[in-house]
Image (cartoon, rainbow, N blue to C red):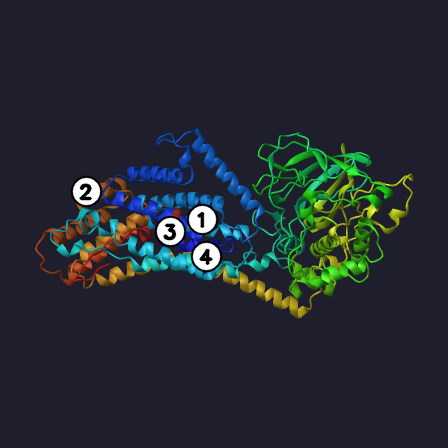
């Protein structure tokens, strides 16, 4: 079992750097499983084994991770506090790191504790319940983590190694414990082994183990590769998946945004009503760290527990003399699953949330690390800064020390980025004018909007190298425009970051008490740059062309020429956003009209996939039935020459009782079992007589002097067995018969060996 868990742990390699965490986890697993094996081997009751494992796990966890909190050798309240703080640190570390994450102490501790418990539970399911097949529960639980976090193709080698290890558990499990019914304990029905000393050897159920292993491999590997919607490509190609947006732990937000935009059918993410005259950009998270050459959430991650209705405080950099308008918005989330809460910036207060939310003061973002915001309804009070042209012209001359991190650039930045930024802004004299020039450059006719060009060109993402290629190709979507403008702004000395969230949404066609109601779909996922100007704060810009998004008034070239005393409209991001059906064809990237040949080929692939799925399901469902049928046929064939035909027939009878879920005691003799069955089963008189004759044949073989069995006696035994099998089927309802036929539990139990002339396994 430890081998299976160890193999399954390698499925986490795409999520975690290094290998030290694997050895730490396996050390805990080995100690726990080894201890349980030793205690169980000394004959201790299963309850003692479980309690010992639980206590051992707790002791190891405390000694490894909270030894300083002990009072002498006893845990205290401080022990729980320390462990809880460690788990919170692990949650935060997982939330802010992108895959592959650094397996720091907190993450390693979480793995050691959780996988240790998984190992204990799996061992108890397999050994405690005497059902080796359940040993696969733990490895399957571990294997399920990576696909839920990162949409990559599964590592076939890891899955095969895990399946082989699980198959080994089934193989060896068939040789111990109840595999010795004909050994030191008792043969079927309690037949003694005294007359047959060779019965002390264990049986081996290789056929059942091989069949179950093949079914498991088919389920884990073959079925996902032929099932639409279960492959990694289905998350990147249009039409492959209709699930709503997922911004969750370990997923690169920029790449995930592109995947969501490429869905062929938009899904409603949320609705909101607002008293603002225009729709609002709803930001979920910000990417401010570009020190490694890829945009990431800024470090260090500073989060405080948020109390419902608590004030967020003053927005960074916003001077008191900048006019602001207060906006009230009510948000109801439909299908969005996210670690972060969609909020307009700068938020001042949120009402209607439960406990557990964390506020990051430097970015005004909120997260609860649970990854599911569906069904939330909350109210937001936010500000809409309205700086004048004069205020913008003089803003940004001084950059506070805390903002210097937003100027950081990686070493080896492609020169084309800084060179292009300098050329585009050559005629600008202030930071604000340079920002406006950058936006105008990207919105010019030189650039076009496309979801597919970055994928086809191999530069989909927000890294420095991808930005350099984008500036040459001049085609991409919001991730590329926002990343390029933010990096170019930094080369010009303007602090910048990227906001990821939603564009304002579809034009409202209804109203509520709070104002206009907007519907926001997955195809309105958006990324935009935010640039910082001291005295005004963080301002969003809109460099992405082709989406009919109107840039904020303050970002337009003629805004600086306006008089400071003129009556200007609110400069908050505005939108004449359209529905998905109204977007330009290039923006939707659904694809051209298909030819009849292409449609026919697509239908053929669809039917082929359907047939493959049906065949795979049939294989999984029918494999146990086929194995059980072959075993029964093999036993009937061997009745003609087996030295103990009665005992062989009784083994088949007991397996049939197992399949029909007939409960009995392992200590029963064949005579005891006969009496029990006569009382409990609706057998007719002929079946009762057949049961008596078969029981006497077994007793003669096990307790009498071996003198051979003639052909007539063998024929009678076969006839009696068939009569019993027919009778037990006739006495069951149709559902019970199908259950016994297609879910034969006798395959999950260790084989009842019936040796003959040195041969084993009937």
Along the line of sight, which residue is nearer the eye, 708 or 719? 708
Along the line of sight, which residue is nearer the eye, 189 or 375? 375
Q: Earlier in the sequence, mark 1 or mark 4?
A: 1
Residue sitting at x 55%, y 53%? 99
Residue ID for mark 4: 220
Say which of marks 1 and 3 sits in front.
1
Distance of label 4 from label 3 (alpha carbons): 20 Å
* SS for callout 2: helix
In the rendering, which numbered label is found on residue 122?
Answer: none
Distance of label 1 from label 4 (alpha carbons): 12 Å
Along the line of sight, which residue is nearer the eye, 422 or 740? 422
Residue ID for mark 3: 743
Q: Residue 16, can we see it?
A: yes
Residue ID for mark 1: 141
Q: Earlier in the sequence, mark 1 or mark 3?
A: 1
Quick check: 346 above or below 521?
A: above
Say which of marks 1 and 2 sits in front.
1
Distance of label 2 from label 3 (alpha carbons): 27 Å
Residue 335, image x, y percentages? 63, 44
Residue 199, image x, y percentages? 17, 55
Q: Residue 550, can we see it?
A: no
Query: Badge 4: few (under 14), some or many (20 or more) residues near its Cα, within 10 Å?
Result: some
Question: Which of the 4 quarters of the picture holds residue 420?
Answer: bottom right
Residue ID for mark 2: 672
Residue 30, image x, y percentages? 34, 49
Query: Badge 3: few (under 14), some or many (20 or more) residues near its Cα, within 10 Å?
Result: some
């Amino acid at each position: 079992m430890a081998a299976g868990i160890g193999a399954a742990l390698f499925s986490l390699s795409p999520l975690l750097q290094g290998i030290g965490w694997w050895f730490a986890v396996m050390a805990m697993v080995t100690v726990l499983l080894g201890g349980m094996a030793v205690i169980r081997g000394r004959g201790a009751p299963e309850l003692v084994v479980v309690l010992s494992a639980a206590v051992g796990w707790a002791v190891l966890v405390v000694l490894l991770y909270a030894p300083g909190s002990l009072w002498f050798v006893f845990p205290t309240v401080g022990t729980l506090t320390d462990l809880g703080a460690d788990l919170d640190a692990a949650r935060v570390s997982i939330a802010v790191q992108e895959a592959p994450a650094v397996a720091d102490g907190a993450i390693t501790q979480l793995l050691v504790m959780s996988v240790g418990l998984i190992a204990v539970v799996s061992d108890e399911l397999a050994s405690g319940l005497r059902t080796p097949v359940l040993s696969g529960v733990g490895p399957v639980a571990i294997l399920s983590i990576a696909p839920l976090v990162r949409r990559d193709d599964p590592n076939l080698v890891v899955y095969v190694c895990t399946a082989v290890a699980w198959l080994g558990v089934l193989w060896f499990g068939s040789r111990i414990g109840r595999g010795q019914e004909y050994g030191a304990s008792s043969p079927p029905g309690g037949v003694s082994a005294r007359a047959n000393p060779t019965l002390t050897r264990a049986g081996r159920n290789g056929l059942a183990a091989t069949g179950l292993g093949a079914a498991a491999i088919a389920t884990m590997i073959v079925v996902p590769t032929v099932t639409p919607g279960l492959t990694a490509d289905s998350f990147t190609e249009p039409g492959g998946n209709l699930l709503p947006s997922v911004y969750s732990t370990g997923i690169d937000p920029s790449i995930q945004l592109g995947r969501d935009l490429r869905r062929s059918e938009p899904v409603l993410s949320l609705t909101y009503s607002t008293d603002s005259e225009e729709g609002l950009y709803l930001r979920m998270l910000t990417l401010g760290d570009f020190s490694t050459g890829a945009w990431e959430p800024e470090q260090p991650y500073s989060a405080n527990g948020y109390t419902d209705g608590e004030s967020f405080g003053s927005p960074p950099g916003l001077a008191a003399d900048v006019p602001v308008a207060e906006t009230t918005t009510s948000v109801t989330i439909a299908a969005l699953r996210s670690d972060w809460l969609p909020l307009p910036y700068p938020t001042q207060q949120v009402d209607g949330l439960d406990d557990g939310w964390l506020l990051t003061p430097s970015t005004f973002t909120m997260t609860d690390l649970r990854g599911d915001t569906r069904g939330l309804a909350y109210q937001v009070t936010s500000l809409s800064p309205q700086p004048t042209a004069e205020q913008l012209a003089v803003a940004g001359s001084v950059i506070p020390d805390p903002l210097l991190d937003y100027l950081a650039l990686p070493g080896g930045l492609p020169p084309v980025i800084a060179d292009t930024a300098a050329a585009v802004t050559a005629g600008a004299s202030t930071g604000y004018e340079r920002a406006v020039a950058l936006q105008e450059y990207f919105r010019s006719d030189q650039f076009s909007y496309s979801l597919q060009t970055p994928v086809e060109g191999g530069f989909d993402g927000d890294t420095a190298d991808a930005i350099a290629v984008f500036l040459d190709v001049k085609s991409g979507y919001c991730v590329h425009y926002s990343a390029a403008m933010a990096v170019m702004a930094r080369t010009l000395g303007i602090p910048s970051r990227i906001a990821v969230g939603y564009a304002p949404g579809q034009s409202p066609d209804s109203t509520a008490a709070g104002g206009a109601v907007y519907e926001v779909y997955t195809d309105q996922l958006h990324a935009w740059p935010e640039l910082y100007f001291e005295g005004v704060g963080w301002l969003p810009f809109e460099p992405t062309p082709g989406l009919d998004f109107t840039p904020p008034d303050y970002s337009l070239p003629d805004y600086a020429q306006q008089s400071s005393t003129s009556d200007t409209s609110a400069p908050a991001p505005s939108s004449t956003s359209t529905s998905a059906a109204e977007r330009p064809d290039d923006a939707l990237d659904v694809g051209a009209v298909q030819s009849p040949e292409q449609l026919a080929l697509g239908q053929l692939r669809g039917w082929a996939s359907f047939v493959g799925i049906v065949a795979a399901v049939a294989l999984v469902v029918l494999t146990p039935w086929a194995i059980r049928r072959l075993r029964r046929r093999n036993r009937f064939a061997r009745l003609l020459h087996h030295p103990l035909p009665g005992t062989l027939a009784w083994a088949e009878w007991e397996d049939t009782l197992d399949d029909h879920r007939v409960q009995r005691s392992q200590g029963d003799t064949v005579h005891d079992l006969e009496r029990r069955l006569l009382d409990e089963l609706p057998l007719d008189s002929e079946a009762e007589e057949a049961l008596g004759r078969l029981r006497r044949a077994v007793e003669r073989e096990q307790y009498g002097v071996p003198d051979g069995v003639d052909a007539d006696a063998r024929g009678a035994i076969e006839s009696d067995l068939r009569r019993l099998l027919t009778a037990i089927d006739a006495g069951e309802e149709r559902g019970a018969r199908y259950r016994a036929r297609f879910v034969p539990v006798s395959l999950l139990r260790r084989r009842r060996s019936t040796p003959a002339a040195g041969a084993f396994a009937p």
